[in-house]
Image (spheres, helix red, strand yellow):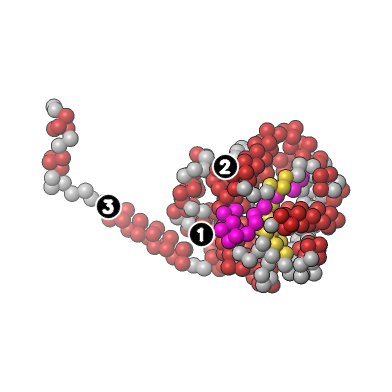
Amino acid sequence: MSRSSILNFESLEGVTLRVPATLLAVLGVVLALELVFRLVPEKKLVPNMSRQGEVFFMEREVLSKFDAPKIVFLGSSRIRRALVPAKLDEQLGLKKGSTVNLGLAMARVYESLYLYERNEAKLRSAEIVVLNLDEWHVSTGPAMSNTLYETHGPISERLHFPERIRTKMLFDGLLTMRVKMKLVPGAIFGRKDDVQNLKLDENNQILPPPRAEKLETYGGQIKMFYDRFDVSPVLLGHIEQLAKKVQANGRTFVLLQLPNRTAYQVEVDRTHKQDFENEVAAVRALATKLNVPFLFYRSPVEIGLTDANYEDYGHMKPDGAAITTRFLGDRLLELRAKK
């Protein structure tokens, strides 16, 4: 038989390819459900005690009280506990309410990017936007499961995640109902203890109750942050996207990495030193590429802290926050003087 006869499609003339009616019906139902879930307002679905629920809280209870912030801090709960806005305003000679701290519990950079994008009309007035990084922010090792990225992250990005999570991330993006269906019972019948224990205090800082963590061992914390640690181009890309948005508004973007508690850092260096160094090197290279400051501090003593100023591995007590705020205030004064 010749090659041409093998590729001759004339023999398929008159052949009708049939798709089973049942399959078409199932596909139609799935697509209809997906459309319904995409139309349901997310505020009615997500728990208050979730990343996205906390974003809504920040918009409703915090940002609504700030007319035109001059200094914005973004990041996880570590920056939320480390920076006292009213004290920084006083140090910088700004009126109270000029600094807003938008740190979110266990937030990755994507949450900060999402919050900035949703509120860019207000936040573009900020002269300086500071993003504090935790070392796990650039790694796909810690679970990416937090509802917000699962349902909002761009499909094109998901193709570049490690193989172990790529398929799930793709399906979650294409069929958001996979994630949202789990939220329906709680949205209908209520969720026990789903109340934000956050409030804006007299210093314009959001302070949840003190953390009760054992300081004798950091094994569990390190395992959560460093298991399957990598430096993800996708997650570095979120930093770059945020930086470019701030720069496009003609403002100054600053990368910050506050020090861990010394005892914790000693254990990190013993078990995952190269991972830590890889993260710092990657962020430093990105800061150079973007031409932005990278304020990196490896040890608490560099900013005037001791381990006694920490609640746990990295969150600061009020006395630690006061010291950190004064230190960062001096750095911001230096940056503003250069403008």
Report the quarter where the C terminus lies: bottom right
Packing grade of label 1 (10 A; few <14, some 14-19, many >=20) is some
Query: Between tags 2 and 1, which lies in front?
Result: 2
Indicate left or right for 45 with 209 as reference: left
Q: Indicate the position of residue 298 as horizontal and vertical percent values.
A: 76, 42
Per the rendered image, the range of residues in magenta is 243-260
Separation of marks 1 and 3 at Cα, in angstroms = 27 Å
Residue that carries the numbered disc 1 in the rendered image? 181
* Residues at marks 2 and 1, CA–CA distance in whole angstroms: 29 Å
Which badge, 2 or 1, comes first in the chain's sequence? 1
Q: Provide residue 200's location: percent of width, then percent of height.
A: 74, 68
Dots 3 and 2: beta carbons under 8 Å? Answer: no
The answer to whether residue 174 is left or right of residue 46 is: left
Above or below, 57 relative to 270: below
Image quarter of residue 46: bottom right
**Label 3 crowd (10 A; few <14 / some 14-19 / many >=20):** few
Q: Is residue 208 left or right of residue 184?
A: right
**Residue 279 seen from this side:** no
- Dot 2, how many residues are within 10 Å of its Cα: few (below 14), some (14-19), or many (20+)? some
Regarding residue 291, the answer to whether it shows in the image is yes
Q: Is residue 224 left or right of residue 232?
A: right
**Which amino acid type is shown beneath numbered disc 3?**
Pro
Indicate the amino acid at tag 1.
Answer: Met
Residue in the picture at 86% in, 46% down: 306
Q: Residue at x 62, y 48 (%)?
A: 291
Label ID, residue 232: 2
Q: Which dot, 3 or 2, sits closer to the camera?
A: 2
